[in-house]
Amino acid sequence: MFVRRASEVPSEPVGAGEGTTRQVLIGPDEAPNFALRRFEMRPGGGMPRHTNAVEHEQYVLQGRARVGIGDEEFEVRAGDVVYIPAGVPHWYRAEGEEPFAFLCVVPNQPDRIEVLE
């Protein structure tokens, strides 16, 4: 068990992303079933179309973005929840004047990321 301030967890750039950072708030070495991560994308930043071997559950904290999931495209904003099944292609593009930030929960299973563009 632990409690920590999210502001004390370091951010790291996401290699495949543009203007995107990630914080691992609760890592796979700290919890047995799920990891909790926080992503932030500066305005105009995002992630290219890609797949993951694990599902994603996300909660949008601030800002807005276009998110592609499979063949559909959505506009999401603070307060929205997003579910991305394992293996489904998806992408992000932050829009507006403020950063787009969300929490992302993933199972602690081996993940394989494949960039499709």
Image (tube, rainbow, N blue to C red):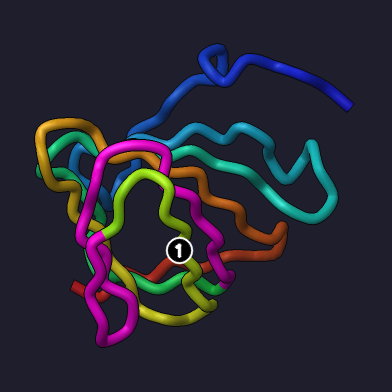
| Number of numbered labels in the structure image | 1
Q: Quadrant of the N terminus?
A: top right
The magenta-colored residue range is: 54-75
**Picture coordinates of residue 24 (x, y %)?**
57, 35
Considering depth in this image, is 59 or 17 the residue closer to the camera? 59
Residue 43 sits in quarter: top left
Q: Residue furthest right?
A: 1
**Picture coordinates of residue 9 (x, y %)?**
55, 20
Question: In terms of secondary structure, what is the magenta stretch mainly?
Answer: strand
Q: Is residue 100 left or right of residue 87?
A: left
| Residue 97 belongs to the span the image colors magenta | no
Mark 1 closeness class: few <14, some 14–19, many ≥20 residues within 10 Å: some
Say which amino acid is labelled 1. Answer: Val
Instruction: Write the residue at 52% across / 77% down.
Output: 85
Q: Residue furthest bottom?
A: 71
Q: Quadrant of the C terminus?
A: bottom left
Instruction: Write the residue at 28% across / 52% down.
Output: 16
**Picture coordinates of residue 23 (x, y %)?**
49, 32
Q: Which secondary structure, mark 1?
A: strand
Q: Residue furthest front?
A: 79
Instruction: Write the residue at 62% across / 15% down.
Output: 5
**Picture coordinates of residue 28 (x, y %)?**
73, 45
Q: Is residue 50 left or right of residue 99?
A: right
| Residue 73 belongs to the span the image colors magenta | yes
Instruction: Write the residue at 42% across / 47% down.
Output: 79
**Residue of label 1:** 82
Q: Is residue 94 left or right of residue 110?
A: left
In the rendered image, the vertical position of residue 6 relative to residue 79, given as above or below: above
Q: Is residue 88 left or right of residue 72?
A: right
